[in-house]
Image (cartoon, rainbow, N blue to C red):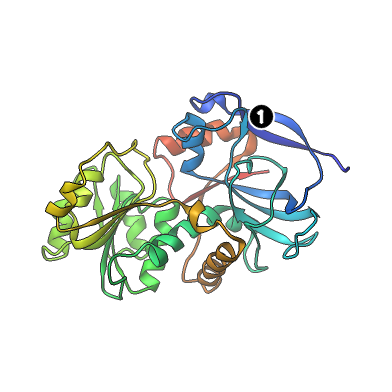
Amino acid sequence: MTAIASRAIHIAQHGGPEQLQLVNVTVGDPGPGEVRIRHHAVGLNFIDVYQRSGLYPQQLPVQLGMEAAGVVDAVGEGVSHLQVGDRVAYASNPPGAYCEVRVMPAKCVCKLPDGISFETGAAMMLKGLTAQYLLLRTLPQGGLNPGDYVLFHAAAGGVGLIACQWAKALGLNLIATAGSDAKCQLALANGAQHAINYAADDFAARVKEITGGKGVKVVYDSVGKDTWDQSLDCLAPFGLMASFGNASGPVPPFAPGILGAKGSIYVTRQTLFTHIATRESTQAMADALFAVVGSGQVKIHIAQRYRLEDVQQAHRDLEARQTTGSTILTL
C-alpha cells in the first residue's frame, strides 16, 4: 500500500461556514473500479453549501466538494478508460473534492482535453454538465427550437453564464434574471437576449412583455422559494418549469391543480447525478461540453479564486451572492 498525505476540508457537524475545518488525512491505494487523483484545482458549487448546512444531510464527518481536475496517480483493478498520468476532470458523488489527493469511483472521471486547463476543468464540470442536461435533455413538449424563448434565473452565476452562451449557440432566445444591474450586464455580454434585474423589476410582467404575452417554453430555476410562484406565471401553455436548485430556500408544497389552471404546465425537479449515473452517459455529456468549450462557443469565467485554507470565506461570499461566474479553490 502506498499511503499519501493530503490536506482536506472536513465538517464534523452541519452548520455555517465555520464548520469547514482544514485537516490532514492519509490517502490509500484505489480499490477495484477506483482511481487516485492528485488535484490541481477544485470547483466550488452551491450544492457544497446545501451539504454543509444540512439542507442535503450527509453522513458525518464528511469531506465536501463535488468537482475537481488533476492527474491520475494510481488506477484500481478493472478501470480501463484511465491510466496513470492522464489529465482528468470530474463532477461526481460521493463528495470529497476539497483536498489535494483523493481516491474515488472512476466511472464519472473523464480525460481532460489538452487544450483545456486544470483550472477551467475544475470550474466547469459540475456547472457545465448541469447546463448541458438542462438545455439539451430537460425539454418541454415538442422540444426546443431556434427562436424559442426560455427564462434562466441566476444567469450571472457559474451555471447561468455557461447556459447563456450555450443557448445562444443553439439559437435560443434566453431571458436572464439576476440580482443587480451589473450581473444583468454580465448575462447580456455572454449571450442572453434580454436581462431582468429581479431585485428591481417584476420579472413575470417583463417576461410577458418581451414575449408579446405568450410566455416562455421553459423556466430553468435554481433559486427556489423566492422565484417559484412568479416563474409558473411566465410559462406558455404546456410549458415546463425545471427546478434544479434552491439557493433562496426550498419550494413550499403546492397543489398540483394549479398546474392545470396555469395552462396545463409541467413541473420537474432535476439533479445532475441521475444524468451521470453511468460512465457512458457521463462521457457523452462531457464530450458535448468539451466540444463547445474547445470551439470557443462557451468560455468559462473564473471570477474568484481562494486557497483551500480560505474555504470558509469562499462559502460566505457564495451565500452572500457576492460571486459571479465560477469559483475555484487553488492548491
Q: Residue at x 43, y 48 (%)?
A: 324
- For the N terminus, the image quarter is top right
Q: Quadrant of residue 81?
A: bottom right
Q: Is residue 224 left or right of residue 13?
A: left
Which residue is outermost to the right? 1
| Between 183 and 102, the one nearer to me in the picture | 102
Residue 201 appears left or right of 61: left
Q: Nearer the viewer, residue 150 or 80?
A: 80
- Regarding mark 1 in the picture, which secondary structure is present there? strand
From this view, report whether residue 295 is shown above or below residue 177. below
State which quadrant residue 145 falls in. Answer: bottom left
Q: Give x and y (percent) for residue 316.
A: 47, 32
Which residue, given by chain and number where applicable, does mark 1 sit on? 22
Position of 48 with respect to 184 (left or right) is: right
Disc 1 residue type (three-letter): Leu
How many numbered marks appear? 1
Split into 4 quadrants, where in the image is the C terminus? top right
Please give left or right for residue 64 compared with residue 199 in the image. right
Q: Residue at the location (65% across, 57% down)?
A: 107
Query: Eyeballing the image, is 317 above or below 174?
Result: above
Q: Is residue 282 above or below residue 50?
A: below
Q: Work out whether residue 200 can be spotted.
A: yes
| Position in image of residue 74 (x %, y %) | 81, 53
Residue 165 visible: no
Residue at position x 72%, y 44% from top? Answer: 102
Residue visible at 42% across and 35% down? 319
Residue 124 point in image, percent of width and height? 53, 56
Circle 1 packing at 10 Å, graded few (<14), some (14-19), many (20+), is some
Where residue 230 appears, as percent x and y from the top left, is: 19, 47
